[in-house]
Image (cartoon, helix red, strand yellow):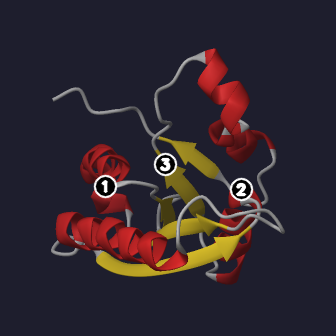
Amino acid sequence: MSLLDRAVVPVATVEDADSTCSALEPHLEDVSSVLAVHVIEKGGGSVDKAPLAKRQADAEEVLERVEDALGDAVAVETKTVYGTDVVEALFETAEDADATAIVFVPRSGGRIVRLLSGDTAMRLVTEGTVPVVALPRNRR
């Protein structure tokens, strides 16, 4: 079994899905299945960022992008998860799915963006309860 055997692949946007799938493609011989996950972050008592129906429609579009990109090469499941903490939701999902790793491509952004966003990538690699693989962006 490979570290990438049962990969949980978090995707936030269509562009993120495209980038992540592109970066994962060269490694698909090590992957038996992908669980693509989109986390809809709930406000936890505060006003949500957008109407729920809109965010659900966006999640469906993002997850379809992963299915379209990888579905011919590997088994792909999709899941929309709701939570107040994206990182916690991803680790809970990975544990529930018996994932061998969470596989992602860090999004670009300066220090200010990372500081304001809570730097999800940093939290993924430092707070992990399952292995985390950060793939480099493909430079096509």
Alpha carbon separation for disc pair 3 and 1: 14 Å
Residue 43 spot, x, y in % from top left: 74, 64
Look at 29% across and 66% down and name the residue there.
66
Q: Along the polypeptide, which appears first: circle 2 or circle 3?
A: 2
Look at 59% across and 60% down and name the residue there.
101
- Nearer the camera: disc 2 or disc 3: 2
Look at 65% across and 75% down and name the residue there.
82
Residue 113 seen in this snapshot: yes
> Disc 2 marks which residue?
87
Q: Secondary structure at mark 3?
A: strand
The answer to whether 88 is drawn above or below residue 95 in the figure is above
Amino acid type of disc 2?
Answer: Val
Task: State the residue in front, 23 or 120.
Answer: 120
Residue 71 spot, x, y in % from top left: 22, 75
Label 3 neighbour load within 10 Å: few <14, some 14-19, many 20+: many
Amino acid type of disc 3?
Answer: Phe
Task: State the residue in front, 46 or 115.
Answer: 46
Which mark, by number, is residue 37? none
Q: Secondary structure at mark 1?
A: helix
Label 1 neighbour load within 10 Å: few <14, some 14-19, many 20+: some
> Disc 3 marks which residue?
104
Quadrant of the drawing holding the C terminus = top left
Amino acid type of disc 1?
Answer: Val
Residue 32 seen in this snapshot: no
